[in-house]
Amino acid sequence: MSPWLPILMAVPVVGAIVVALLPKGSDKLAKQVTLLVSLVVLVLTGVMAAGFDPDGDRFQFTAAYNWIPSFGVKFGVGVDGVALVLIALSAVLVPIVVLASWHDADGVKTADGTLITPKRSVKTYFSLLLVLETMMIGVFAATDIFLFYVFFEAMLIPMYFMIGSYGGAQRSYAAVKFLLYSLFGGLLMLVAVIGLYVVAGKSTFMFPELVGAIQDPTTQKWLFGGFFIAFAIKAPLWPVHTWLPDAAAQAPAGAAVLLVGVLDKVGTFGMLRFCLELFPDAAKAFTMPIVVLAVISIIYGAIVAIGQTDMKRLIAYTSISHFGFIVLGVFAMSSTASAGAALYMVNHGFATGALFLAAGFLIARRGSPFISDYGGVQRVAPVLAGFFLVAGLAGLSLPGLSSFVSEFMVMIGTYESQAHGSGALTVAAVISAIAVILAAVYILWMVQRTINGPTAEPVKAFKDLNVREIVVLAPLVALIIGFGFFPKPLLDVINPSVHQTLTNVQVPVSTIAEKGTGQ
Amino acid sequence: MTTHYLVLSGLLFAIGAMGVLIRRNAIVVFMCVELMLNACNLAFVTFSRQVGNLEGQIIAFFVMVVAAAEVVVGLAIIVTIFRTRRSASVDDANLLKY
Amino acid sequence: MESEIAQITQHTGGVIGNAWLMIAFPLVGAFILLVFNKLTDRWGHLLGVAMSLASFVVAVLAFFELIGFGASERRRAVELYEFIPNLDLKMGLLIDPLSISFALLITGVGSLIHIYSIGYMAHDEHRRRFFAYLNLFVSAMLLLVLADNYVGLFIGWEGVGLASYLLIGFWQFKPSAAVAAKKAFVVNRVGDFGLLVGMFVIWTTFGTLAFKDLYGKIGEAGASDGVMLAIGLLLLLGACGKSAQLPLQSWLLDAMEGPTPVSALIHAATMVTAGVYLVVRSGAFFFPEGSGAALAVTIVGAATLLAGAIIGCAKDDIKKGLAGSTMSQIGYMMLGAGLGPAGYAFAIGHLITHGFFKADLFLGAGSVMHGMNDEVNMRKYGGLRKFMPITFVTFFIGYLAIIGFPLLSGYFTKDGIIETAVHHAPVLGWLAVLGAGITGFYMSRMVFMTFFGQKRWADDAHPHESPAVMTVPLMVLSLGALGLGAWLVLGGTLYDFLIPSVGGSAAEAPKFNPFTTPGLVTLALVAVGAVFAWMRYGRAEVPAVQPRGSFLTTFARRDLYGDAINESLFMRPGQWLTRLAVFFDNRGIDGLVNGLAAGIGGSSGRLRRIQTGFARTYALSIFIGAALLTGALLLVGTI
């Protein structure tokens, strides 16, 4: 019984209550308290992560308390390598988002003074943010599947309000769409969770005890379907992706970062842990259709992204393409690809986070998300333009930046995967590599129309980034470059748990020694 | 032996129901509802007698208490509606729709 | 011949052990200049030059340390750190004759161009940023050539692509520059696709991406010929993108939107030769002499050398003319690189001498533009030799070198390639001879239009010689253009030096012999070309406005319709596809979702009409419901 994870989950929610109870008119204090709390969580996460032993047990820092004894539901938490890096990702992103959203609820004005979004409750926004942080940590830390389900659904609530109350003009449409989509998937998953409980007949929801509990292939397929659809909606995978562009475009930039950067990762995380390990036979049976969907997502997302006129929608579509890569990696049944997918989850959080935030800073200055309203930002705000470009380059997986390593691992792992004969996944890898070209088109075309070219008249009044905004973006860029050249620390944590997953799926974990024999 | 009571109860219930459906005046509708409740009471007491235990009579008391409470709230609502709209017709109070 | 390739020795300590400093110096320079921003405005350019020079010093010291070893020990691997454990990939450097030759060229010519840029960019308010990008480029290019594995090479490969993107778009406020930058990056990415997939195949087949492990595994893995050919062609696609070879040539001409020093350094001397480096570096594995892949390399090279030369003939823009000639000269290198060890030495030799004389020509063109208010149209030059004597002399030396005037640099290396090509692949070899003749024509045309003939200047032009900070690098480069070729080729110096890296054997070293048929024919054709150019552009009046040309001229002016083909084959259909996809997404998928929502909303809107507001209607429905329920229960006999 380690108190680490319960403490990590308790700190933000206590902070949220404190922020909510602050007296009226203490907006600034609310922001400061939120920042402080999120930094405390970051430090605690860092200290906890330092104590993680990659070669030790799979789940560490475990704790389990009885919750609903009559059904064997426990408040069971614990982290493996993948969960740990995702919790760390959340802990890093939250303080950055807090700083980035500093004025989002104050009523955003453009450079010439027109109000884009009216003033709304600052305290509510920041306490929602902290509640969300608890949920994000909880969903990755849960080892009890029922608890996981509860967090999976409960996460929707704060995000629903952050989009619905603090978003752009079409916020309620986007928020409802987001909620309905996710609820639909969540309910299917609930059915599958109950089915799993009943069929396994072990009177427990604890994940480690349920691995291997379902042997019948048909049952596996049905339960797999329930989980997979929920995760595919969350991830989002083509063709159930259309909620994301709306939600991300309408959400305030900070909320969009958490939505795309962390919440959506629950989908791919769930696929890796639950779909693969609980239902290995079904996962293998469905590999090919899922790989096809993933490849469609990759190419389709990229092509649709090229045609977008709204920056935030464009970034959302690039994410659909990137999530295609992650799903491809998860289901490629090769240790390199799966480790790459897990790494991609983290790297994508940094890269897309930086891109959303930089785009958010642009939009805050101009009051319009439309690409055609910009042009020549480089001349008036070179620092902003520079950060935007670097974030964009991370989005197109430029080698030397972190997303490249993961994308490369996913593609090369898929290429070498022998699942379904040697040909099928090889073709999938080659097709997905076309996205490398498309990514250059969508990012650089956007850069060309916003940053480059003659300076548009309304852009001339732009101020360059202030210190707060630089402090927001600089750590992300540092992480992107740092992990681009030194991905080993992350991989060392991820690899053992990915290997464990694949061993449970009975995929031979290819060791380097076996390579080089040729085919 | 108890058949007559049950027939009476049924008749009273039917009269009450028809009143609720046909009459427009809220007071009369209200009284018809009371009639239906009392028809039920009669049936409860009759069955209590027939079966030979007291549970039916206990329920009858519950019904009376509920009916009394309902009168208090219901009449107050009707009086308020009459005050604001100068009409006690239930068809006029049709704003709560769609 | 493969056996002549030396084993790679692990190395620690010394200058070579710290060769990463070569990459680190300019990287630190770029970092400081970009992060400290305006604080470094006053001295930023000096820092940039210092970092580049520091790199050069390390390269020179490493070179001397390397030649201290015996020939068979001249391949030194330095391990830096573990990169991707899943791919058993360690980041490391490979210091061998091939990579050190490149490193010397990059840092040497790079430093000269850095110095030149101090003067050239003196009046640009963003000079600091320019030097930051140049430093970034040098760093990435060194990583490209020094990395001991394909992934490291690829990181450098894309790094130089990024630097090229940033520098082509340096004057990004011009829409044409912004578009050209994007085009360069995207076209390069098409090539990168090939390189990327090539790496997949290499990894899957051989289980390693490190050069030193590949040597051992190529033979024993027993990969099929098809796989080997596929790898070769995929790598060639990558090389075509970076080196502007057909069919991915179209970006290079547009890339001339960048400042002239950029064109000299990146789009002439170093970056565009990365494709040649890739082919030569992989030559021993994937382009063995006589293989299909090597044949493809030679065909691409020969086709491009002709295409570039033809384009060069028709351009009035001095930089675009030089760009065409760059394509053409890299075509020669490619041709050489496909001919096995005998060709490698000449290809690399030509690459080095070309680095000097082409940088010399580009910087000379820059010097002319500097004195002519940034005019690039040669029809508005004329008679400039009297006003810019130093520029003229240095440019003229570069010109003589590129057309292969006897005893100058280009003569030795280009003639070497032609001789080897005629020997190994006669058809392509004679095409290369023809290309040399065309080179003689278009380069002479350029010199005559610029420096000879009548003045055709704009009224406000005041041609003047450039400052010493620009002319001194020109002089140094023209010295290289004068003598480097003889030093490298005569006596087989470069050939012997490169044997440990690329194979070949000292016994088979090609002897330089100028008195062969192809050599003499080449000289004759070049002379014909030059004389023809003299008649058209030297002696005769050059029209100030471009005359309507024949079909062939238009063909060349429009870059052999490369852009038109790209546009009608890829861009237009691509735009349609994009629009279709967006439409499908909004109306198809999202339409389905919204339609479902609207359907439910609509039917509930109709259903709610049942709620009429009449309490008695509700009562009736309750009674009917109760009656039905009672009836149903009676029917099934429950009551």
Image (tube, coloured by chain):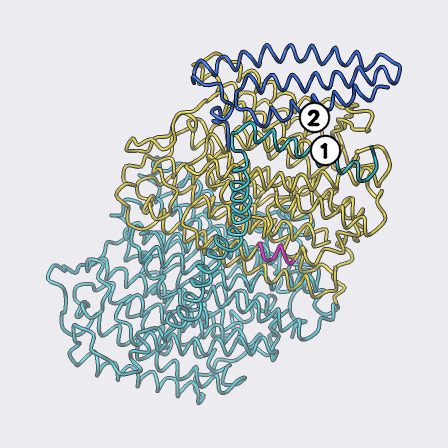
Residue C607 visible? The answer is yes
Q: Which residue is mark 2?
A: A5
Shown colour of chain A: yellow
- Camera-nearest residue between C603 and C425: C603
Screen quadrant of the C terminus of chain A = bottom right
Chain ID for blue: B
Whether labels 2 and 1 share one chain: yes
Which of the two labelled residues, at mark 2 and mark 1, occupies the earlier sequence position? 2
- Give the number of the disc on residue C252: none
Among the 4 quarters of the image, the one containing residue C571? bottom left
Q: Which residues are magenta?
A: A292-297
Q: Looking at the picture, how far across and down is residue C587, in whole percent? A: 48, 54
Question: In this rendering, does residue A96 appear at all?
Answer: no
Q: Is residue A138 toward the left or the right of residue C615 in the image?
A: right
Figure check: A430 above or below C534: above
Magenta-drawn stretch, dominant element (helix, strand or loop): helix
Of residues B77 and A400, which is closer to you in this image?
A: B77
Mark 2 Cα-neighbour bin, 10 Å: few <14, some 14–19, many ≥20: many
Q: Position of residue B31 (x, y in %)?
A: 61, 16
Q: Secondary structure at mark 2?
A: helix
Q: Residues within 10 Å of mark 1 (few under 14, many from 20)?
A: many
Contact (CB < 8 A) between labels 2 and 1?
Answer: yes
- Residue in the foreground of this view, choosing between C24 and A345: A345
The image quarter in which residue B56 lies: top right
Give above or below for A287 relative to A363.
below
Relative to B83, say whether C366 is above or below. Answer: below
Chain ID, cyan in image = C
Q: Residue under mark 2: which chain is it in?
A: A
